[in-house]
Structures are given as C-alpha cells and as structure tokens.
Image (tube, rainbow, N blue to C red):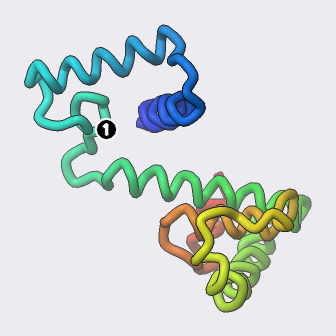
C-alpha cells in the first residue's frame, strides 16, 4: 500500500511542477483510472489499490502512522543515538510532551514547517505532529516504535 501512496505523491509532484509523468508512472495511473471507468472497481481507492483488509485501518491512517513513526525514529537517533530503547523512549516522550504543550500550539496553524527547524530535533517533532497520527505517545508505545 505504501508504494501506491508513494506513486500518488510522485504524480502530484510532477503535476505541480507541470512536468510530464514518466512512462511507468503514467501507465500505472492510466490503468487505475481505466479500472475505475470500466467499473472494475467501485471507487478510485479500489482502482488504485488503496483497499484496506476487512477490519484493517484505512490507508490514510496507516500512512500517517508510518510518517509519524519514521520522524520519531529519526528524532531518537538525533538526540540519543547510543542509548537503549527504554532510555530513548523516555527522552522522546519528554520531548513530545514539551513540544505538544508549547511550540506545537503555534506551529499547528502553519501549513509549512518553520524554516529555522531544518536539521534540528524540532524538525522531526514537527513532522511527527504534522503527520496527523495520534500524538503525543506514552513510553510503552514509543518503545515499540523505536525498537523496530
């Protein structure tokens, strides 16, 4: 499913730049649209392969969780690369609580990350919160995320 989402992001990027789609990407998109128009799929989600398993989580939530978890892993490598999982989870939980109670209250209103966050721990915090997945997280869940 993540490949489909990545492809859709690529299509969006090419379209925003006014650039032609590469043949493989154009072929994939055309085939999906044809499945939809030919009524082989009930909706575009199905035609493009974004169908969740019975009882599974929706693709957009899975994508948000994946982006959040990636940002949290990068954050842990930035702030405590040599610590064990428990120590990293404790430190990240503390950073999440602080950011959520302070800067995020202002940052959430902005569509883009503040430029001065680039390359800092704040950048990863911003990405984690902006992902749309549940935040902040407790130490137990963080140990699971960081232990991967």
| Rendering quarter of residue 44 | top left
State whether residue 77 is above or below residue 90.
above
Using the image as rendered, state which of residue 42 and residue 85 is in the foreground: 42
Could you say where residue 123 lies in the image, as x and y percent from the top left?
77, 64
- Extreme-bottom residue of the structure: 101
Could you say where residue 90 lies in the image, as x and y percent from the top left?
74, 79
Using the image as rendered, state which of residue 135 and residue 19 is in the foreground: 19
Q: The residue tagged with tag 1: helix, strand or loop?
A: loop
| Rendering quarter of residue 40 | top left
Could you say where residue 119 lies in the image, as x and y percent from the top left?
87, 57
- Horizontal side of 39 relative to 81 (left or right) equals left
From the image, which quarter does the N terminus lie in? Answer: top left
- Extreme-right residue of the structure: 82
State whether residue 35 is above or below residue 87.
above
- Residue at left 32%, top 17%? 30
| Residue beneath disc 1 | 50
- Residue at left 31%, top 53%? 58
């Amino acid at each position: 499913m993540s490949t489909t989402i990545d492809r859709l992001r690529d299509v969006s990027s090419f379209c925003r730049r006014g650039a032609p789609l590469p043949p493989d990407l154009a072929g994939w998109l055309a085939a999906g649209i044809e499945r939809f128009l030919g009524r082989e799929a009930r909706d575009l989600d199905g035609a493009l392969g974004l169908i969740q398993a019975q009882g599974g989580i929706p693709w957009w939530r899975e994508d948000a969780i994946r982006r959040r978890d990636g940002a949290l892993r990068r954050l842990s490598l930035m702030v405590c690369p040599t610590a064990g999982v428990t120590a990293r989870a404790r430190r990240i939980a503390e950073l999440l609580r602080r950011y959520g109670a302070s800067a995020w209250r202002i940052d959430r209103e902005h569509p883009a990350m503040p430029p001065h966050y680039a390359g800092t721990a704040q950048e990863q915090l911003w990405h984690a919160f902006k992902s749309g997945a549940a935040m902040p997280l407790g130490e137990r869940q963080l140990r699971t995320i960081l232990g991967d």
